Amino acid sequence: MKLKVFRYDGESGKGGKSGKFHYDSFEIESGPGMTVLSALFKIQEELDDSLAFRYSCRGAVCGSCGMLINKVPRLACRTQVEYLLKGEGQVKLRPFPGMEETVSWDPEEEVLVEPLPNLAKIKDLIVDMDKFFKFYRAVEPTFKPASKAPEKERLMDHEAVSELEKYTNCVLCASCVGACPISGKKGDEGEGEEAKGEIKEFLGPAALAKLYRFHIDPREADDDSRLLLANDKSGWWGCEFNANCKAVCPKGVPPILGIGKARREVQKLGKEPK
Ligand code: SF4
Ligand code: FES
């Protein structure tokens, strides 16, 4: 089987700083069940040991192998090459920055592997996750219980648990951010002292899904502080409901659903977006 792989060397200055990139084609022997991550290892071990990519668990748990595979953000460790070559797993997405064709490729013959869009490229398939985690931290993604820890566990009813579970399985792979037509765009100029002239960017689907998850957690304070934290265009109001986030999430998290619900709640409170 053939893989066409995006190559970029930001470190050596071999065109990296100028944004130049190219694609390398590799031919390897594939076996049943071979994943894109295994194919990349095979290339690294047998054909080109300079190929750079991220991974850790190899079991769809750590979220580090998110990349653009056949123009869809996916986890390389849970995407099988045979499946792609058979034309399965096609996902219809609204246009987003990585979707444009930068190289010709034949999906029946080749698997195209590129870095996730909307994040700065570092080397080959590795992107800079700093911005992703900056936005993630901005929503204060830690549990803030409203009361002291009880002797036993904090009980929740089944309905609350099943609502929370929709958002808790996130593995922080950034696939949703990579597929989002809004993430990566510059936001509006901030106004007033608080904004200090910063360009506020959309926090993105993963951070907003996490914020919503804590907002609905019945063990936290029953107030609107979480909800109002993102009551502006960099938050709930920046989304244009393209739904690419939900379509590509390998864990079935529906950021768009939480964003929509959060908006309706803000409207009920009669709070104007900042
Ligand atoms: S919401 Fe889904 S796609 Fe987005 S970071 Fe979490 S697991 Fe990845
Ligand atoms: S290597 Fe951990 S999710 Fe793919």
Image (cartoon, rainbow, N blue to C red):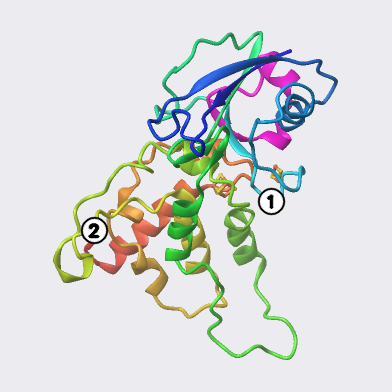
Could you tell whether 123 is left or right of 2 in the image?
Answer: left
Q: Which range of residues does the magenta coloring cover? A: 70-91
Residue at (42, 25) in percent of width and height: 20
Residue at (40, 51) in percent of width and height: 260
Q: Position of residue 197 (x, y in %)?
A: 18, 60
Which residue is under mark 2?
Answer: 198
| Label 1 CB-ligand 2 distance < 8 A | yes
Figure quadrant of the C terminus: bottom left
Relative to 213, say whether 62 is above or below: above
Does residue 83 belong to the magenta stretch?
yes
Please tell me how crowded label 1 is: few (under 14), some (14-19), or many (20+) other residues with Cα within 10 Å. some
Figure quadrant of the N terminus: top right
Relative to 259, say whether 5 is above or below: above
Residue at (37, 42) in percent of width and height: 184
- Determine the CA span between mark 2 and mark 1: 32 Å
Q: Secondary structure at mark 2?
A: loop
Residue at (47, 28) in percent of width and height: 93
Relative to 115, say whether 194 is above or below: below
- Which of disc 1 and disc 2 is earlier in sequence? 1
Q: Can you tell which mark lies on residue 62?
A: 1
Q: Position of residue 68 (x, y in %)?
A: 56, 30
**Quadrant holding ligand 2?**
top right
Q: Amino acid type of disc 2?
A: Glu
Q: Are marks 2 and 1 in contact (CB under 8 Å)?
A: no
